[in-house]
Structures are given as structure tokens and as C-alpha cells.
Amino acid sequence: MNESNERKVAYHVKVKGMDSFVFGVRYDVNRTDTPDAVLQDYIHENYGNREYEYQEIENYFN
């Protein structure tokens, strides 16, 4: 599939006591029952069990 046609979502993420960053992912790799599934996996792999909060950024990829 052409990358320009892929639907994507971006999150502004704040990891408690650490970093703040933007995380982008294609919709089709997230599970529909857990919209932030890929983000959860990334946080766990890179920051352990730290608390984090996120907010979806609209139109980030437009």
C-alpha cells in the first residue's frame, strides 16, 4: 500500500519523571479493542512499568 494512503495516528506521550515525545503509528497495526496497544508495547520495552499519559494529536500527518 502506498504510504501516503495509510491512515496514521500520532500521540504526544509524557513518561512520568522522564521524556516527552511524539509517537506515530498506522491504525492497522493497533488492535481495535485497545487503540494504544502499540504505544503500550513501546513504553514497556523502553521505559519498563513507568506511568505515562498520552493525548492523540489530530492532523499530525497532514
Image (cartoon, rainbow, N blue to C red):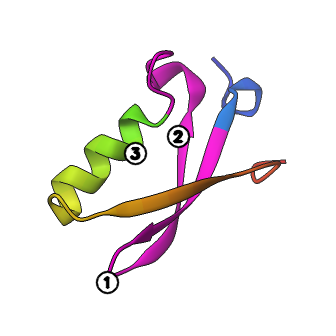
Residue 28 occupies which quadrant of the picture? top right
The label nearer to you, 1 versus 3, is 1
Amino acid beneath label 1: Gly
As helix, strand or loop, the secondary structure at mark 1 comes to: loop
Residue 46 rendering spot, x and y as whole percentages: 21, 61
The label nearer to you, 1 versus 2, is 1
- State which region is magenta: 9-35
Mark 1 Cα within 10 Å, few/some/many (few <14, many 20+)?
few
**Mark 3 vs 2, N-terminal side:** 2
Q: Which residue is mark 2?
A: 25
Amino acid beneath label 2: Val
Amino acid beneath label 3: Leu
Residue 42 rendering spot, x and y as whole percentages: 30, 49
Residue 21 in magenta?
yes
User: Which residue is found at the position 83% from the left and 48% from the top?
Assistant: 59
Q: Is residue 57 left or right of residue 28?
A: right
Residue contact at pointers 3 and 2, CB within 8 angstroms: yes
As helix, strand or loop, the secondary structure at mark 2 comes to: strand
Residue 48 in magenta?
no
**Mark 1 vs 3, N-terminal side:** 1
User: Which residue is found at the position 21% from the left and 65% from the top?
Assistant: 47
The label nearer to you, 3 versus 2, is 3
User: Which residue is found at the position 44% from the left and 19% from the top?
Assistant: 31
Residue 21, relative to residue 23: is it above or below? below
**Picture disc at residue 17:** 1
Real-space Cα distance between discs 1 and 2? 24 Å
Real-space Cα distance between discs 1 and 3? 18 Å
**Picture disc at residue 39:** 3
Residue 57 occupies which quadrant of the picture? bottom right
Residue 41 rendering spot, x and y as whole percentages: 27, 42
**Mark 1 vs 2, N-terminal side:** 1
Residue 29 occupies which quadrant of the picture? top left
